[in-house]
Amino acid sequence: MRAKDFSTLLEMIMYHVRAHPHHQVVTFGDAGTTYGELWGAIESFAGGLLEGGFERGDRVILALPNGPGFLIGFYGAQRAGGIAVPVAPESGVGRVADLAALCDAVAVVVDDDLDPKASRTLGELVGPAQRRLLTLSESLAAWAAPAVEVDGEDIAFLQYTSGSTGDPKGVKLTHTGLLTNMDQMIAGMGITEEDSFVSWLPVHHDMGLILMTMVPMLLARPMVLMPTSVRSIRRWMTTIAEHRATFTAAPDFAYRLAVRYVRDGDHPDLSSLRVALNAAEPVRAGTVADFERTFGLGHVMAPAYGLAEVTVGVSMWGPGEAILADERGCVSVGQPFPEIEIRIETEDGVMEPGELGEIVVSSPANTRGYWGNPEATRALLTEDRSVRTGDLGYLDRDGNLFMVSRLKNIIIQAGRNIAPGEVEEEVEGLDFVRRAAAVGIDRGGPEGEQMWVFVEPNVEQAKATEAWDDMVIDVVSAVHGRLGMRPGRVYLLEPRSIPMTANGKLKHAALRTSYLDGSLRDAGKILFPEY
Amino acid sequence: MKPTAEEIRKLVGRQLGLREVRLEDDIAADLGAVSADIINIVAALEDLYGVVIGEEELPDLRTVDQLHRLVCERVEAR
């Protein structure tokens, strides 16, 4: 089955609803949902939206956790002729409200068990005059939606990503682009109608959503979805074993934790695995070796590369072959999928094999740009509509891609992209803070890169040693409230010790270096804590 | 020098952004720490007290009190 046989995602689902309504589309926990049940709920969700005056092209924010409920909201919004906007459900209410305002959503849909306090706050923040706040069950109408025309060129959803400046940008992804990239990935990854999928990834993000739910739906192959929490890493492994799954995907850190959580003599049997795709953060050669050795597997781990701006998948190392690492220890992410071309560019033009530069991707699945942000779109797309990825890399003589580092200061903690600017803005909102800098620090431990926050308190407060403890607590709490994740560490610094450029930009790389080489501490710039 | 329970309590509170931390609190269940938070707490303790806590010990660490006792053992054994 090819995705290109369909013009929209809805047509793809409808095909399966007609062909085998009682076939299971997804298993979540102990419960399965059939194509017929899913479609019925999609119709009710769309009916509820249209009843509320929803119009073609309107946006719906979905702050929903992994589970069939997400799929109902996601395709229900499209069925009503609109655009789904998935948001991490653990985001603070402030962030959800900000994104709702950025894309001017008409409704925000949250999980039924969102705690009443958060719900009230969110209700106030989203502004009832502009948009409605609904729980998933409130969103379902008792009647099915009337027919609404949906076109392949329509935007199916906006994938919000963090830019380095802190303004989240909504990548526009069309039905056609999604279907095209699905075919590219299926061909490039050698996915067949024999594969079965277990996913622990969040469905609100592209890899978990497109690769791990849309591809299995297209092929009507078994898809087991799990709660996406670091606490369920062990269960992710045992679920692969129970379902004899052949395909899974995760960022490197998840595989590192999987190795750690599995103790001697208690190894789930993962021999069914054909591909353990490793992407969304730098791949460590050590993780590949540890994972395959721990579970007694051949070459199943496949380092891969992708980004939302090209829909999702760009390239993958062929499973079944030993990985390729260069002298720097950088692991190749393989060759591009069909119809995708990669070139390496610098100010001097296109680079030769082996030469470093920015990775530029040309593909029919490239985004048309960012929602309501022509300036960022111009910076993203070249004249021939290729995507400037903002990643630094090179191609070797055989055409294998190596992603070396990011050009921007994005922090990748636990596979999630974090914009330093968003963290800094939140922390600088605290009344005792003069300036803040968020930096990605990787000390080589299993946790990988972590967000560390450096804070200069105001001059007066910097002297109030007895308040330092509380200041750190407030910083952690502010970041956690915003992003749903905590910094690895917070340091209070002497006033004017965060390095800046002449025109007032933070020098993140210089700060990271001075911290890691000990010179920041040696110069007496760190006030607190003493470790 | 062996850490006091108060020092450990404060360190855990700083890492998790909490003013109220009790010794009997379960770090994950009561204080809401996820795995990455626990790894970062351990890294901070290692930096502060110059001890090493193996990764294989983490799944058994539940309460702040257990964490305190473990660090004391390691400081003594040094």
Image: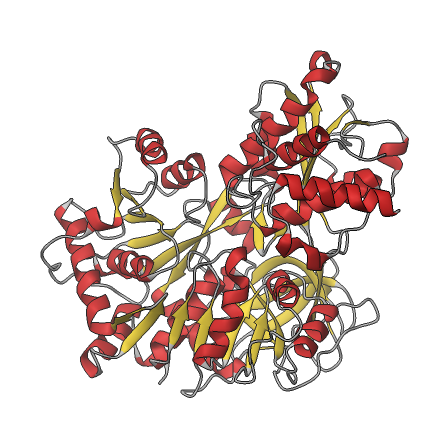
Q: Residue A290 appears in which quarter of the rendering? A: bottom right
Nearest the eye: A457 or B74: B74
Colouring of the image: secondary structure
How many numbered badges does the structure rendering display? 0
Residue at the farthest top position: A460
The answer to whether residue A112 shows anywhere in this view is yes
Nearest the eye: A74 or A239: A239
Q: Is residue A164 above or below residue A424?
A: below
Residue A117, given in percent of the width and then of the height, sits at: 34, 32
Residue A514, given in percent of the width and then of the height, sits at: 84, 39
Q: Residue A213 appears in which quarter of the rendering? A: bottom left
The answer to whether residue A332 shows anywhere in this view is no
Instruction: Kindly identify the residue that appears in the image at 63 percent across and 47 percent down.
Output: B38
Q: Split into 4 quadrants, where in the image is the N terminus of chain A?
A: bottom left
Instruction: Kindly identify the residue that appears in the image at 36 percent across and 40 percent down.
Output: A100
Instruction: Kindly identify the residue that appears in the image at 87 percent across and 43 percent down.
Output: A517
A13 relative to B1 in the view: left or right = left
